[in-house]
Image: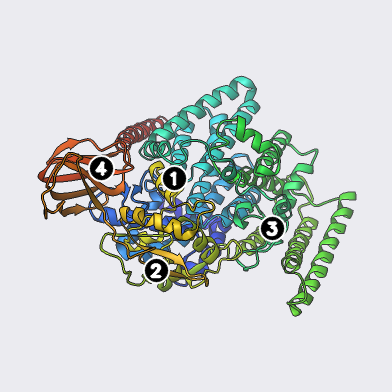
Amino acid sequence: MAFVDTIKMIRRLSRSPLILLLLAPLVLYAPIFLTGKAVFWGTQWLQFAPWWAQAARTLAGGELPLWNPLSGLGAPLLANHQSALLYPPTWLYLLAHALGGIALMAWLMAPLAALHLAWGGWGMARLARALGWGTLAQTVSGLAFGLSGYLVARSHFLSINAAAAWTPWVLLAAFQIARRPGRRSILVFALVTGLQLLAGHAQTTWYTLVLALAFVLFWGWQAGGRRPALEAAGRFALGGVWAAAMAAAQLLPTAEYLLHSQRAGAYAYDLAMQHSYWPWRLLALVAPSAFGNPAHGDHWGVGVFWEDAAYFGVLGLLLAGYALLRRKAPDRALRMFLLACILVSFALALGQNTSLFPFLYKYIPTFDMFQAPARWLLLAQVAFALLAGLGADQWRAPEGRALYWSRLGTAGALAVTLGAGLGWFVLSRRPLDYPERLATFVPAIALAGLWALGAGALHLTAPLRENATPRRGWAWAVVLWLAADLLVAGWGLNPGASLAQITEPPPALPLAHGARVFLLPHDEEALKFETFLSARTFDVPGGPAALRAALIPNTNLLDGISAAGNFDPLLPYAYAEIMGWFALPEGMAEEDAYAAWQASLEYLNIGLLVRPDGEGGFVYQSGLIRPFKPARLHYFPAADSVLCCGERPLRFEWLRDSANQVQLLFSAPAAGQLVLADLNYPGWQAELDGERIPLSPDNRLRSVDVPAGEHTLRFIYRPFSFYVGAAVGVLALLGWAALWRKTHAAE
């Protein structure tokens, strides 16, 4: 019977405009995953693919992926929140790597990113349904969110893609908490919030919870005033605590990592204000490519394109405005609430461009936790999507004076389209005779006029009567026009590359076994952002193979190469201090600095440098002033030790060298200190001949005092925070399942 019901539901969905919520994101990514390509640009290949490849190899070796020994002198892996190793969809990447290596894992990124967009759009549609709106309004809201510029432009940032997809579901659960008190609503809220916490982007989750709390208070107040609002807030807090408990295996190690990272305090002001919303980008709400587009290779606007993206279609914008301007329409309180969300969102997103955010950064907790104020636009994106749906639900054909202005506006849109289109044609015939900025502005305005023209035609043919069911053909025209607009705007924002290019390994390196490769910090910045990953274009000189061969952190993980560089949101504080050794002192000649750096690099087991060649490429360099003599293990005899002539200072043999464990057999002629050129971090323990010994707290690297003679030394990573978090998470999940079963049985 359930099978028959499922078939009927699928048939109904296939005839409903709601099917576009699934199909449109797949169409957006189809040129990638249907042609044997994989998404390729930025963080996919500098963070996510490398982390997951390393995690998959660690699991294949029989260990939990708790530690990453190959980046940054070693660093926590699971505790890195953005790795999202406990998020269920991430397990598909790990399985894909086990079955087909990097190629299959890379291919999977496109369909999973598309499905997350679809999931976000479907969640927004379900929220619109819970508000009592019809199918057309649900589809409009879902498209305006799932295909929005905010989500699509940031989809290459896979943790944002995953976390933002859960935002509407958290808001829907918050709505149910306020309007339908009971255990079931708390359990649903805890589940979806827990999954968003595991999705890997704390900033998105924090902004979602801020908006969800506002939702709870608003709908609670609407239900009966202050008392229902406070009671709903209490249920919200209970669900949030439960969600955190279920995600404790991720959150506790991450909290420990944060406390021992370069971000243990507040974000520095300049970093916190980075990616403040550029006020002129308000024009991009109508013409998203007015300031160029990296997908076209011509972005010239201030800042980074995808950080300021917030487009949701010309039709979506007009519908949102229509909803706000209908004075006699119901839901006035909701419209004012959503308008307030938009205004607050943009005010915060402006960051350093106003005095508001700097004031909040200085005096209000949490505003110094994250960078990129433009990401506050998530709140506006949600509010715009809901207003667009509300406008669609109340859409009626204009009458009287409104009809006159509607016809005039449609004629104006036609004039803009024809005028800008003609200008576009003329300019394209003379590509060298006009400013670059005009080349992006004119076609963007022409497209905006086209989308407005279609919206005007739809408005003039809208239903005439209140509560009239929209004609089927007209409703389909509305959602197809909106989907086309959003697909054109998002096309190419997540570029792909062939699997053959992506899986091409780097050349054989002149690197001693176990030694590390390194890009000096200023060289890394130059190669990463000036040579390969420009904000102007998605074109990567030399393609994925060149980026991989340059070993830009963390691409080294793709090939199991050890590197001293690390490109993570959190970096161990001790590592950040060590990297400070290689800052070029002001006024010092590079040659003098290099002479000082040579010994430090050898001490850190660095055997090869990757450096810009001054011609837009890079070279491998095996030393600064002489060939490197790297060493991973260092022995320092005690001050009172006397070594006989000709006696070898230390003999040793590696017994095991895995992700979470290093074991060696050594013979020391005298008592002294052994230093392993790997990072010291809470959770690492040392055992000498099976007995626990302390690690030196004064050394940033793992060091222990050892006696003379032959002994076995083992370093093992046992993070207490993970095991406590796992126990808490299992108990919370079991409790959730038991209560869900009891609640379901009672209903």
**Mark 4 or 3, nearer chain start:** 3
Residue 703, numbered circle = 4
Q: Kindly identify the amino acid type of the residue bearing the numbered disc 4.
A: Ser
Task: Please say whether residue 1 is visible from this viewpoint.
Answer: no
**Most extreme residue toward the top, as rendered?**
227
Q: Kindly identify the amino acid type of the residue bearing the numbered disc 2.
A: Tyr
- According to the image, label 1 marks what residue? 570
Residue 314 vertical position relative to residue 642 in the rendered view, above or below: below
Q: Nearer the viewer, mark 3 or mark 1?
A: 1
Alpha carbon distance from label 3 to label 1: 45 Å
Q: Kindly identify the amino acid type of the residue bearing the numbered disc 1.
A: Leu
Q: Are marks 2 and 3 in contact (CB under 8 Å)?
A: no
- Describe residue 322's horizontal placement relative to residue 521 as left or right: right
* Element assignment for label 3: helix
Residue at position x 57%, y 53% in the image: 151
Alpha carbon distance from label 4 to label 3: 67 Å
Residue 613 vertical position relative to residue 197 in the rendered view, above or below: below
- According to the image, label 3 marks what residue? 478
Taking depth in this image into account, of 4 and 248 the one nearest to the observer is 248
Taking depth in this image into account, of 625 and 270 the one nearest to the observer is 625
Quadrant of image for the C terminus: top left
Q: Kindly identify the amino acid type of the residue bearing the numbered disc 3.
A: Val
Q: Nearer the viewer, mark 1 or mark 4?
A: 4
